[in-house]
Amino acid sequence: MTLSVPELIVEADRCVACGLCLPHCPTYRKTGSEADSPRGRIQLMRAVAQDILPNNDRFKEHIDLCLSCRSCESACPNSVNYGALVDTARALYIQKKNIGMTIAKPFIRHRYLTHILTWSLWLTQQLKLSALLQHLLPATKLLPNIGKPIAWKSLYPATTQHKGAVSLFLGCASNALDQQTLIASIYVLNKLGFDVHVPGSQTCCGSIARQAGDRIEASKLVARNASSFEQDTPLLTTASGCGAGLKDYLPQHQVQDISTFLMSCDWSDIQIAGLKEKIYVQDPCSLRNVLQSQQAVYDLLKKIPDANIEALPGNSQCCGGAGAYIITQKFMANMLRNDKLNTIKMHHVAILATSNIGCSLHIAEGLREEGLKVNVMHPIQIIAKQMR
Ligand code: SF4
Ligand code: SF4
């Protein structure tokens, strides 16, 4: 939710400066600076809103370093809406950064361009030209192995007794880079008796634009999604980062993370093959702090006979894979990721389940750089594999 200036001041005044959120803030834990803590940022936002402090580069620096992970919100005894405060500060006070956003905007707006881009990246990988591309565009090191691009149908009917209908949100990054998760989602939902609608008019959730302070673009994207999806049909997301943005800005729609929806379904007729493996689960901040539905992932994976499901130690700390943050704030993003990589090494993790494409790309890039062989998968991919 984006606030007006008076609303921002009222919400910021609700912070009683108790400091209980400080130990939960990843950036404060790394820098030790009050200005990089939730309490400090709230004071800065209020002071700038009241023209007590200038809206200058130093202010921007501290707001830019915030991951929007919203751990502070979960810890706050006064339920201060930090998410709304930081979205508003970015929209009202931060000059548009447009780093990445300027390039990304046409691709976000027009799905055919995303499709062309995905085909180009896929061909680059098929022709073994990835090293050259990474040399020219270092950000492409984030790219996983991309499957052959798919043109989605608008409806995938249930393959067993019909039990209902859902809509599936594709998401820009998932649609371009992780179509396997979307295919697995459709497969599982159809097997459970659900028609899956994939409206062709859907677009980006708006989180990248919001993070860049581009409120106008974000509002346009929200409006297009609002008219693309039926309000009375569950709207399922496979990337919790998108789910969090949709939940905040499409309150009339029934937005749910796919694992949560699946836990409300009848699984009595479904056969799942056993898997004698330990699966570690990484909780994305958006799933934990905004959608508050991380438990469903564990419950879903526990349906796999013989599998040992464990939380990745240190799950409450953000991995740094917060959307465009991995490009705009690489130093902090990598520092946070190193903590995850050390945990992964220490626990000899072989399979890591995560429900957010941002976390998955960021962690997988770090694993590749360190030469660690860990299978990073979306939980729905693991379940679908055991059902086939
Ligand atoms: S959203 Fe995350 S990084 Fe930002 S202030 Fe809150 S805890 Fe810190
Ligand atoms: S926990 Fe809440 S009230 Fe306390 S300092 Fe943090 S934001 Fe303010």
Image: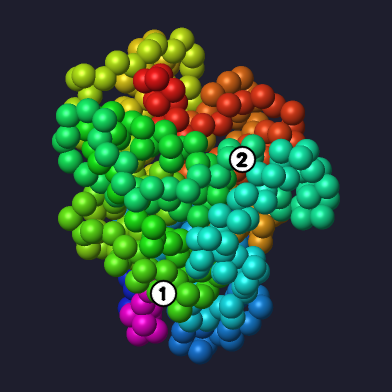
Q: Which mark is residue 60?
A: none
- Type of amino acid under label 1: Lys
Residue at image location 36% in from the left, 37% down from the top: 186
At a point 78% along the width and 48% down the height, the residue shown is 134
Secondary structure state at the residue bearing disc 1: helix
At a point 78% along the width and 50% down the height, the residue shown is: 133
Pointer 1: what residue? 220
| Residue 334 painted magenta | no
Left or right: 300 with respect to 172?
left
Q: Closer to the camera, 1 or 144? A: 144
Give x and y (percent) for residue 302.
34, 21
Q: Nearer the viewer, residue 357 or 47?
A: 357
- Horizontal side, residue 172 vs residue 232: left or right: right
Secondary structure mostly taken by the magenta-highlighted segment of the chain: helix
What is the image's colouring? Answer: rainbow
Which residues are the magenta region? 2-9
Q: Name the residue under label 2.
A: 146
Question: Which mark is first along the chain, 2 or 1?
Answer: 2
How far apart marks 1 and 2 lie (CA) works out to 29 Å
Residue 295 drawn at (x, y percent): 33, 34
* Above or below: residue 73 compared with residue 41: above
Q: Is mark 2 on a helix, strand or loop?
A: loop
The amino acid on which the numbered mark 2 sits, given as a three-letter code, is Ile
